[in-house]
């Protein structure tokens, strides 16, 4: 009888243990929530562009949520306004990391602002997916927690210069670049590309953010008989005036090219289709792409956008970055989001991951670069992007 009681007691104990184990197993299967941040300029002229970045990220989050692509984690998005200012970027980064508790960040747009922000993320060991590839300082920084979700500007510049020279036969290139880090690095990249072709600029002029008249610079280019003007850096809203003055002062047949900011929503908002017509620039993705996934993205983006406009190239950088993050988390598997080494493990998983995005296959290199090619697009007579090459 005593033995029977012992057997019953043991069985009851085993039942309780199995029940507890089952409960824990059930809890382990529940998705944890990860906070992610979007830091960009939601103030002033950059507000429209910032909102479109948000929409691109939101499309990815919606797709991931609806499809169940993320196996172990859900996401909570928190935004921060860096006001396109390096000092403000540091404040925003500190708030996102130490107050909001984000485990990954998307931002910032300008290279100088990005460098200010990622110094915080690097110290806190929080991965940052940046849409800014304008400066080599980002990839040469030695930071281990930054990822460029766009081809570096040296790749973009080479694509543009090679197209202008080899495909269009331009021989007297002029360059108008902003006197800031983005513009200066863009000039250096374009100059390198020309050097590789055994050429040099016929004329190169600078301008500053806030300028509204460029008569002197364009008259100088006219005197050098430039047949093409490359514009790089600065506020995209300044370019509407530049388009007009190039036609008036240099000639209506002058080809205008430049950086990927020509696809920015702020530029489209500030220009007419006539002003945009003929502008050529390099991108890793364009709304002119007609593959099934791009068409789906464009439709979903327009539904979210209060202006229902087609998305520009910058928007997909956040989209692709989000899929790279979700893929890394899938590869990482379930892990306590509150663990002190969670972001360290996540960063290791990101470096070892690869994902097919709208811009191509994102495969992080040791320095954080994820993409290595770009395309050439042009605004047609209706001011709409067309894929050229």
Image: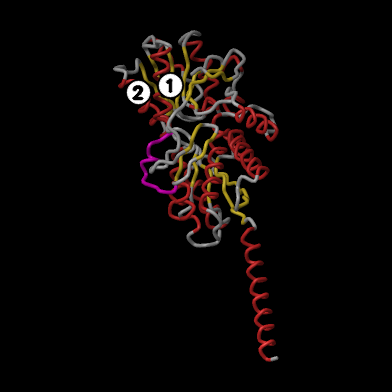
Residue matched to label 2: 193
> Label 2 near label 1: C-beta < 8 Å?
yes
Q: Is residue 135 magenta?
A: yes
**Residue 292 vertical placement versus 333 (above, below):** above
Q: Is residue 301 left or right of residue 89?
A: right
* Most common SS among magenta residues: loop
Mark 1, Cα crowd under 10 Å, few <14 / some 14-19 / many 20+, is many
**Residue 150 vertical placement versus 121 (above, below):** above
Q: Considering the numbered disc 1 on the image, is that residue within a helix, a strand or a loop? A: helix
The quarter of the picture where residue 59 lies is top right
Residue at image location 31% in from the left, 21% down from the top: 196
Magenta range is 134-145
**Total number of numbered labels?**
2
Q: Considering the numbered disc 2 on the image, is that residue within a helix, a strand or a loop? A: helix
Residue matched to label 1: 160
Q: Is residue 71 magenta?
A: no
Q: CA distance from mark 1 to mark 2?
A: 9 Å
The quarter of the picture where residue 2 lies is bottom right
Q: Where in the figure is residue 151, as x and y percent of width and height?
A: 45, 32
Which quadrant of the figure contains the N terminus?
bottom right
Query: Disc 1 or 2, which lies upstream in sequence?
Result: 1
Q: Where in the figure is residue 221, as x and y percent of width and height?
A: 40, 14
Q: Where in the figure is residue 48, as x and y percent of width and height?
A: 61, 33
Q: Is residue 114 left or right of residue 23?
A: left
Mark 2, Cα crowd under 10 Å, few <14 / some 14-19 / many 20+, is many
Res. 243 in view: yes
Nearest the eye: 220 or 312 = 312
Q: Where in the figure is residue 250, as x and y percent of width and height?
A: 45, 10
**Residue 42 vertical placement versus 277 (above, below):** below
Nearest the eye: 120 or 20 = 20
């Amino acid at each position: 009888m005593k033995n029977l009681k012992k057997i019953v007691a043991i069985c009851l104990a085993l039942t309780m243990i199995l029940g507890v184990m089952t409960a824990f197993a059930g809890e382990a299967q529940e998705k944890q929530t990860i906070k992610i941040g979007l830091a960009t300029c939601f103030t002033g002229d950059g507000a429209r562009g910032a909102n479109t970045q948000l929409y691109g990220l939101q499309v990815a989050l919606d797709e991931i949520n609806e499809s169940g692509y993320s196996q172990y984690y859900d996401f909570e998005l928190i935004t921060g306004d860096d006001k396109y200012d390096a000092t403000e970027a540091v404040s925003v980064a500190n708030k996102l990391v130490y107050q909001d508790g984000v485990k990954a960040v998307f931002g910032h747009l300008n290279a100088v602002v990005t460098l200010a922000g990622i110094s915080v993320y690097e110290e806190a060991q929080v991965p940052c997916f940046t849409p800014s590839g304008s400066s080599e300082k980002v990839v040469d920084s030695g930071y281990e927690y930054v990822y460029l979700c766009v081809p570096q500007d040296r790749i973009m510049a080479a694509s543009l210069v090679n197209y202008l020279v080899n495909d269009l036969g331009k021989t007297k290139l002029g360059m108008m670049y902003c006197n800031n880090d983005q513009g200066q690095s863009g000039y250096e990249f374009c100059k390198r590309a020309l050097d590789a072709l055994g050429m040099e600029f016929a004329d190169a002029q600078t301008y500053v953010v806030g300028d509204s008249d460029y008569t002197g610079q364009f008259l100088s280019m006219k005197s050098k008989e430039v047949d093409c003007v490359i514009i790089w850096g600065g506020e995209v809203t300044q370019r509407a005036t530049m388009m007009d003055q190039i036609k008036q002062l240099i000639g209506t047949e002058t080809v205008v090219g430049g950086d990927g900011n020509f696809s920015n929503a702020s530029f489209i908002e500030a220009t007419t289709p006539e002003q945009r017509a003929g502008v050529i620039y390099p991108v890793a993705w364009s709304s002119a792409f007609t593959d099934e996934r791009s068409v789906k993205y464009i439709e979903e983006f327009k539904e979210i956008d209060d202006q229902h406009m087609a998305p520009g190239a910058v928007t997909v950088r956040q989209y692709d970055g989000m899929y790279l993050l979700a893929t890394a988390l899938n590869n990482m598997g379930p892990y306590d989001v509150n663990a002190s080494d969670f972001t360290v493990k996540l960063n290791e998983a990101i470096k070892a991951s690869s994902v097919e995005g709208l811009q191509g296959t994102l495969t992080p290199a040791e320095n954080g670069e994820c993409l290595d090619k770009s395309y050439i697009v042009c605004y047609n007579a209706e001011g709409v992007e067309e894929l050229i090459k």
